[in-house]
Image (cartoon, grey):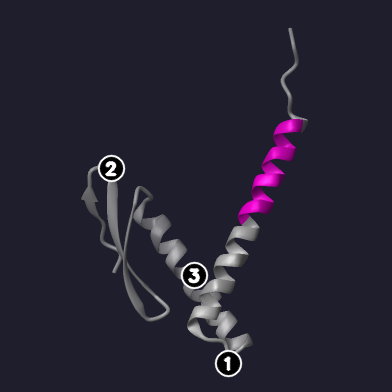
């Protein structure tokens, strides 16, 4: 698990997420892909522990929703920080 194969500027990364094997193609490092895989598995396990009757599809959908929500929060925070750090005119 986790050995990249180059495809131009992209790499293939084999990951096992919630027991299912995936080949992910991207330009991120192996360490990044492993960290994402581990975090996804941790979060999916936590969701399944909190709501055992939740299907894998429901857990994956909720995980994706939370990830996009976090992404929007980070984008808004970055926008706010960029607006407060306007360069001075000379």
| Secondary structure under the numbered disc 2 in the rendered image | loop
Question: Percent x, y for residue 80?
Answer: 74, 39
Q: CA distance from mark 3 to mark 1?
A: 19 Å
> Which range is magenta?
71-83
- As for residue 79 lying within the magenta part, the answer is yes
Question: Image quadrant of residue 25?
Answer: bottom left
Residue at the image point whose x is 72% and y is 20% from the top: 87
63 lies left or right of 19: right
Label whose residue precedes the other's in the sequence (1 or 2): 2
47 lies left or right of 1: right
Which of these two is toward me, 31 or 23? 23
Which residue in the rendered view is the most extreme toward the right?
84
71 lies left or right of 83: left
- Is residue 20 placed above or below 32 in the rendered structure? below
Residue at the image point whose x is 22% and y is 50% from the top: 6
Q: Which residue is mark 2?
A: 9
| Secondary structure under the numbered disc 1 in the rendered image | loop
Q: Which residue is mark 1?
A: 53
Residue at the image point whose x is 49% and y is 79% from the top: 57
| Secondary structure under the numbered disc 3 in the rendered image | helix
Question: Image quadrant of residue 34?
Answer: bottom left
Which of these two is toward me, 70 or 46? 70
Residue at the image point whose x is 74% and y is 29% from the top: 85
Q: CB of mark 1 within 8 Å of CB of mark 2? A: no
């Amino acid at each position: 698990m986790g050995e990249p194969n180059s495809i131009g500027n992209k790499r293939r990364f084999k990951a096992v997420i919630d027991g299912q094997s995936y080949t992910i193609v991207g330009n991120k490092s192996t360490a990044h892909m492993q960290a994402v895989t581990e975090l996804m598995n941790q979060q999916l396990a936590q969701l399944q522990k909190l709501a055992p009757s939740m299907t894998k599809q429901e857990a994956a959908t909720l995980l994706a929703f939370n990830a996009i929500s976090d992404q929007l929060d980070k984008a808004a925070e970055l926008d706010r920080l960029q607006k407060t750090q306007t360069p001075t005119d000379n």
